[in-house]
Image: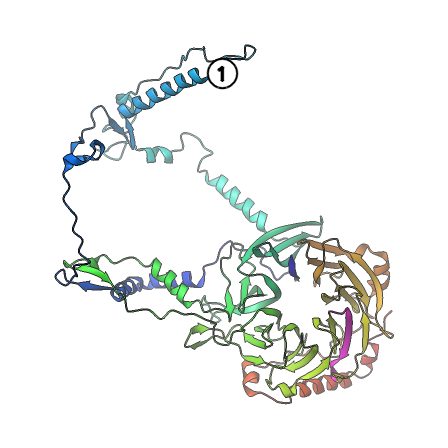
């Protein structure tokens, strides 16, 4: 089943992804090896786990006496003293033993051939009977002198000195045997170029990120859709430890690998929420990733990392000397980590949203009823180690938080929806539940989306199939418009088209995707058609942010369905004149000025009336635009 699907914007992914990346434990291990700290830690661990015991102090229970055994009483095959070390008739040629053993192998082969002759079936006269055909094979006797003359195993070989033993079998395996195709550097270079060409992401490739599970196996797939030839294939996948529920794309995280930016790196990352309380952040540009780049919350894994580090350390042999025995300590136990990390969610992570203004900030909603804000570049030290803790925890919901979304341009404004049948508008600068604006729903919230072209509009879909839109400047009152998008099965997800103003997509477990025109709702959006995608009940839908006419969806059928609406005449007739390059395209009512504000600073300051002030700022932006605001709902 596909739980979540998302398009990766063009240009974000590395065209030539790497095959492997060192994990945090491996990176720390290599740093200690280079610094020469590995031997010291190995001796310390040896001294901690073992203690010296004198032979006189050893207890009688630990001393085991082995009774003497008469060799004559043992079976013949166990009397090792009766065996001779002589190997008469056997010579070693390199690493190969020849002589009696070779003759025994030939005799065994002849005996096996005789047995096959006896057991052959002679009942059929029509069939060819090869049992009576004599074996005319001749076994060439081994010529040790000839082998020595060729430099194999003899003192007259072609080695580096006169007293050498000649070529060994290992030398022969490394020889090219006059075959230019073996170990040919040109062929290796061609193979490397072919491998790079196979994994290279081209300009016409569109990437689709899919979180799915099949039986007991969960994975994150990076699919490539060739827009030129309409081919779809899996580029690489990442195994996941738990069933995925949601995902969010991001670009800025804090890495354990040091760099000129204090470990802060920009790249192609995804955050995964699952039935586990932890949030995993994976690097999508690494094909054979074995563990996530970051884990927010979840179980404390310090104990397993320390155990892996201790297993890599060499065992000290000097500690076993001195005529003393070693005894394992029984009562001393190390303080192993366990339980949840400080500040972690305590239940499944059901929703994620990465801030597009403050690109290091991630919001998460959980089944424990809380919303947490994470700065993915800021880690702090505590009793349970050095890892990222949440910057703030919001508790304005009384039930599971199913969906949330950051405002596209106001970087501190967050919309959340939950199973308490409420959609809320909170400001990240305040953790006071009294400052949160709330609107009531008739059913549980399923999806939230901001209109990218009219950013004062917040759209909410619920499980009863109703989709409602509020003007957040008047949030809490009646919605601007409301409609029943899907009568059977409710709305499971929705998505706005970033290139075509007014185009809204909804999907449902009734297996269909529906298109709506919300640019001039009078009194509700206009339906523009629907389609059965033939991939089962749909759970997720997404519009390609780098092209106006591609959409993808997935669900219970465990397959991706891609719909290119450019070939739909009715849809083109309505939306073709609204693309981003059109002069009469509706514009946003909010000035897109990204405030240069430190997220940690505003979180620490706090503001009980932060939400109201943010909405007032949006109203001022509306008034400053004057007559330009009247063109919002007009279309050509």
Write down the quadrant of residue 360 in the picture. bottom right
Rendered residue at 26%/25% (across/down): 148
Q: Quadrant of the C terminus?
A: bottom right
Write down the quadrant of residue 71 in the picture. top left
Instruction: Please state if 190 lies on the left or on the right of 542 as rendered.
Output: left
Q: Which residues are magenta?
A: 463-473
Write down the quadrant of residue 593 in the picture. bottom right
In front: 148, or 238?
238
In x, y percent, where is residue 144? 27, 22
In x, y percent, where is residue 397? 63, 79
Number of marks drawn: 1
Instruction: Please state if 73 lies on the left or on the right of 451 as rendered.
Output: left
Residue to which mark 1 is pinned? 121
In front: 312, or 76?
76
Rendered residue at 87%/74% (across/down): 522
Rendered residue at 54%/75% (across/down): 375
In front: 333, or 21?
333
| Residue 606 visible | yes
Secondary element at image label 1: loop
Magenta-drawn stretch contains 80: no
In x, y percent, where is residue 12? 61, 62
In x, y percent, where is residue 80? 19, 35
Magenta-drawn stretch contains 467: yes
Q: Quadrant of the N terminus?
A: bottom right
């Amino acid at each position: 089943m596909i739980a979540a699907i998302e398009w990766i914007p063009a240009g974000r992914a590395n065209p030539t992804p790497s095959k492997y990346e060192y994990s945090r434990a491996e990176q720390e291990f290599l740093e200690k090896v280079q610094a020469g700290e590995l031997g010291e830690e190995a001796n310390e661990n040896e001294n901690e786990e073992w203690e010296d015991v004198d032979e006189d102090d050893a207890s009688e229970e630990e001393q085991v006496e082995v009774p003497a055994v008469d060799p004559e009483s043992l079976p013949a095959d166990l009397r090792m003293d009766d065996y001779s070390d002589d190997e008469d008739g056997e010579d070693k040629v390199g690493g190969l033993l020849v002589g009696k053993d070779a003759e025994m192998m030939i005799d065994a082969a002849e005996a096996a051939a005789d047995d096959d002759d006896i057991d052959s079936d002679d009942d059929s006269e029509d069939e060819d009977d090869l049992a009576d055909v004599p074996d005319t094979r001749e076994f060439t006797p081994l010529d040790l002198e000839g082998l020595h003359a060729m430099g194999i195993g003899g003192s007259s070989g072609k080695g580096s000195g006169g007293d050498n033993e000649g070529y060994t079998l290992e030398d022969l395996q490394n020889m090219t045997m006059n075959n230019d195709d073996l170990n040919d550097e040109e062929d290796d270079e061609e193979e490397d170029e072919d491998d790079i060409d196979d994994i290279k992401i081209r300009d016409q490739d569109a990437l689709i990120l899919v979180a799915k599970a099949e039986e007991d196996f969960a994975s994150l797939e990076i699919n490539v859709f060739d827009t030129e030839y309409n081919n779809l294939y899996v580029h690489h996948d990442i195994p996941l430890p738990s069933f995925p529920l949601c995902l969010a794309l991001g670009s800025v995280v804090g890495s354990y690998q040091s760099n000129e930016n204090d470990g802060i790196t920009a790249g192609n990352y995804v955050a995964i929420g699952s039935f586990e309380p932890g949030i995993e952040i994976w690097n999508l540009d690494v094909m054979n990733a074995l563990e996530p780049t970051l884990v927010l919350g979840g179980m404390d894994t310090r104990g397993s990392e320390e155990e892996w580090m201790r297993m890599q350390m060499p065992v000290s042999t000097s500690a076993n000397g001195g005529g003393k025995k070693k005894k394992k300590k029984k009562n001393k136990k190390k303080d192993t980590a366990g339980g949840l990390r400080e500040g972690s969610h305590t239940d499944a992570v059901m929703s994620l949203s990465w801030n597009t203004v403050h690109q290091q900030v991630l919001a998460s909603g959980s089944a424990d009823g809380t919303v947490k804000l994470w700065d993915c570049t800021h880690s702090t030290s505590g009793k349970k180690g050095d890892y990222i803790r949440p910057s703030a925890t919001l508790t304005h919901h009384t039930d599971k938080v199913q969906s949330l979304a950051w405002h596209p341009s106001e970087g501190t404004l967050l919309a959340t929806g939950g199973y308490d049948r409420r959609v809320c508008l909170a400001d990240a600068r305040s953790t006071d539940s009294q400052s949160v604006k709330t609107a009531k729903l008739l059913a549980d919230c399923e999806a939230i989306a901001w209109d990218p072209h009219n950013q004062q509009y917040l759209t909410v879909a619920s499980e009863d199939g109703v989709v409602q839109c509020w003007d957040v400047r008047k949030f809490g009152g009646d919605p601007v418009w409301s409609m029943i998008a899907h009568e059977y099965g409710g709305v499971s997800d929705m998505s706005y088209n970033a290139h075509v103003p007014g185009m809204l997509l909804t999907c449902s477990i009734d297996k269909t995707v529906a298109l709506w025109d919300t640019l001039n709702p009078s009194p509700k959006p206009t339906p523009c058609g629907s389609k059965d995608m033939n991939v089962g009940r749909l759970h997720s839908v997404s519009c390609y942010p780098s092209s106006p006419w591609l959409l993808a969806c997935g669900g219970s059928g465990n397959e991706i369905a891609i719909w290119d609406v450019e070939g739909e005449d009715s849809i083109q007739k309505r939306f073709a004149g609204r693309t981003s390059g059109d002069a009469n395209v509706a514009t946003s009512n909010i000035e897109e000025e990204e405030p240069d504000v430190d997220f940690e600073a505003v979180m620490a300051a706090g503001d009980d009336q932060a939400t109201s002030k943010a909405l007032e700022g949006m109203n001022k932006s509306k008034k400053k635009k004057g007559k330009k605001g009247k063109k919002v709902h007009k279309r050509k």
